[in-house]
Image (tube, grey):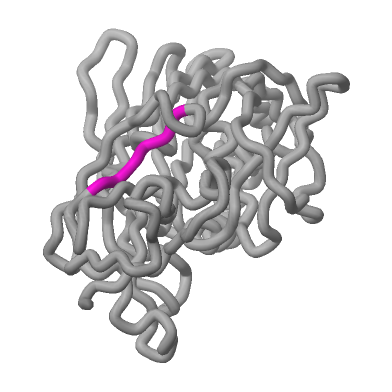
Amino acid sequence: MGALLDRVAETAAVEGVLAAVRDGLSGVLVLRGDAGIGKTALLEWAAGQASGMQVARVAGVQAEMGMGFAGLHQLLIPFLGGLEQLPGLVFAQSADSSTGGGPGTIYANLYVGNHADVKLGARTVKIVEDTRYPWDGDVSLRLEPEGSGPFTVALRIPGWARNQPVASDLYRFADNGGELPVISVRGRNAGPERVPIDVKDGYVRIRRNWKRGDTIHLTLPMPARRIVAHAGVKDDEGRMAIQRGPLVYAVEAIDDGGQALDLVVPRDAALRSRFRPDLLNGVEVISGEGSRPFVAIPYYAWNNRGQGEMAVWIREKP
């Protein structure tokens, strides 16, 4: 199951449109976007825009989470299968086959601010997750199990945090590496304990005797990085795209002097990021100096401010 979830997560990050709108009359949330985008990246972004509250129950997982959304786009994602699936995608659980169905494992798949009750055998584990993901990579999960006891918590480490933007050689990061994720566990009356980053099937597994108030801290570094395509993709030769965390960025004419397609950003140009609460309901933007100063916005948010040029693949040389 872990490998499958990880493949879904990894293929979601690079291309597609992410958007959603709340139906104010019925309270139904309609997720919209491009059918080429994976569910995981869509849900990560959408939950990151949280403002309202929604309760849903799926497969032994109850989660209360923010469900406010920004933007109105044109294409319905037909395969999403309903908002009611979201809690089951945020967390999943399984019995441990090695122990004959013993204490079990909780999988943390999506990093979303939420409160959840996860059934793990005869035990219910309350989880309070706090994060601003995808705008930063700091995530905390406070566990409140019904009684102390051993079980495993498996944290998904996205492909982009392991220097793999997609689960193939179609795209790769232009630099040779980045900072590694950091995980620690802090007990209610104890200092933090670092957890080795040993990724198997996309997850770091933490097995211990969990007590009420134990808190997992996960840091996923989010520098702005350049992506280049496989040499066989001739249309992208000599060009790069910008990714920060799970989100790919685009330049729009409205931010870049009325043009976007002629922008040149050399490989050694510095990239800076900052949060703009006043722009597009709040987004992290990336700026730098190329053939002219430029600002890039998350790709899902483009085409919300009038017509104009847009570019994802940016030339590195004139």
Residue 153 appears in view: yes
The residue lying toward the viewer, choosing from 219 and 261, is 261
The residue lying toward the viewer, choosing from 195 and 95, is 195
Vertically, is 124 above or below 10? above
Left or right of 57 on screen, residue 247: left
The residue lying toward the viewer, choosing from 13 and 111, is 13
Left or right of 173 on screen, residue 311: right
Residue located at (34% from left, 37% from top): 137
Residue furthest front as drawn: 258
Q: Position of residue 233 (x, y in %)?
A: 43, 86
The N terminus - image quarter: bottom right
Residue 91 appears in view: no
Residue located at (57% from left, 32% from top): 47
Residue located at (66% from left, 23% from top): 63
Vertically, is 83 above or below 213? below
Q: Position of residue 135 (x, y in %)?
A: 39, 35
Total labels drawn: 0
The C terminus - image quarter: bottom left
The residue lying toward the viewer, choosing from 23 and 180, is 23
Q: Which residues are magenta?
A: 282-287
| Residue 29 falls within the magenta-colored stretch | no
Vertically, is 94 above or below 55? below
Vertically, is 115 above or below 97? above
Residue located at (81% from left, 54% from top): 78
Q: Position of residue 111 (x, y in %)?
A: 49, 36
Residue furthest top as drawn: 189
| Figure quadrant of residue 89 | top right
